[in-house]
Image: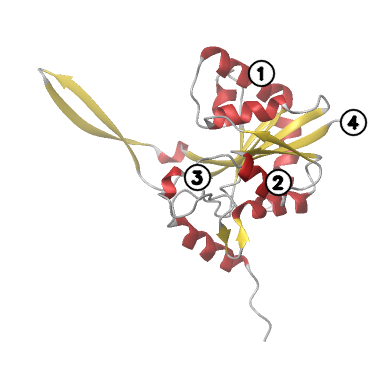
Amino acid sequence: MSRTAAILLAAGSGSRMNGVVTDKILAPLAGRPVFSYSVSAFMQSAIADLYVIVYRDQRQMLELSAYAPTPSVLVRGGNERQESVMHALAALPADIAHVFIHDCARPLIQPEQLVALHKIVRREHAVVLAHRVTDTIKEHLVRTAGGQEHVRLRTIDRARLWGMETPQVFSRELISRAYARVQARGLHITDDAQAVETLGEPVALLENPHPNPKLTTAADFKYLEFLLAQESPPPAA
């Protein structure tokens, strides 16, 4: 029987926090560590048979292990996100057929979304949680002529644009093959779907109706706490 693994990425440096917190993944968010929200959502969904937790250093590993679901494997991350994912993929046992890859700096993932992604990946082999881009997006173009730079803007049709989120979910064979190509070609990628794109393989999108922002700067804590408060039931009278 094939199984599903959830790779939980927690090894990011959090450099854009500017020292406000020492570890954004373990920092308190509405009274709980950021990491615990992702763990809770995955456990409620019951879609994962194995968790691979990617940590930054020994100290973080010890703290993360206190919140690790069962069964878990802890794997040390690399210098960049794509290295961390490759380390996690290498740690998977042979019977894993599908892989969720989730950035734990996105703590608002919902269990029902995980269940929906699990159903889709068994049919499509690659699926990403995403949202439609609503801002007007412009490309900044610079052309040099006669020793001078000429700058112009070009508006991109936002009807075709989607913002990528996590989890991103794949058949184990597909994502392993994709990362092997990324490594062989020395490519730099910013998400896992981009690795699959190098193979020319399709990636399905699941539109997310709920906010799922990434915790990047210190200002994001207040926004995430506001969103969490909207999800919580009102106190009993």
**Kind of element beneath mark 2:** helix
Which label lies toward us, 3 or 2? 2
Closer to the eye: label 3 or 4: 4
Assess disc 3: are there few (<14), some (14-19) or many (≥20) residues with their C-alpha within 10 Å of its C-alpha: some
Residue 177 numbered mark, or none: 1
Residue displayed at 50% across by 45% down: 132
Tell me the amino acid under the disc marked 2.
Answer: Leu
Spatial distance from mark 3 to mark 2, Cα to Cα? 19 Å
Q: Nearer the viewer, residue 73 or 82?
A: 73
* Residue type, label 3: Arg
| Contact, mark 3 vs mark 4 (Cβ under 8 Å) | no
| Type of amino acid at the residue the image marks with label 1 | Arg
Residue sitting nearer the eye, 65 or 83: 65
Which comes sooner in the sequence, label 2 or label 4? 4
**Amino acid type at image mark 4:** Met
Sequence-wise, which precedes: disc 3 or disc 2? 2
Tell whether 67 sits left or right of 59: right
Residue 114: which disc?
Answer: 2
Name the residue that disc number 3 marks: 132
Q: Is residue 106 left or right of residue 220?
A: right
Q: Is residue 215 above or below residue 28?
A: above
Residue 87: numbered disc:
none
Q: Nearer the viewer, mark 2 or mark 1?
A: 1
Q: Which residue is mark 4?
A: 1
How is this picture coloured? secondary structure
Q: Position of residue 174 (x, y in %)?
A: 68, 22
SS for dot 4: loop
Q: CA distance from mark 2 to mark 4?
A: 20 Å
Answer few, some or many: residues within 10 Å of disc 1's Cα (few below 14, many 20 plus, some between 14 and 19): few
Residue 196 shows in this picture: yes
26 or 85, which lies in front? 26
Which of marks 3 and 1 precedes in the sequence?
Answer: 3
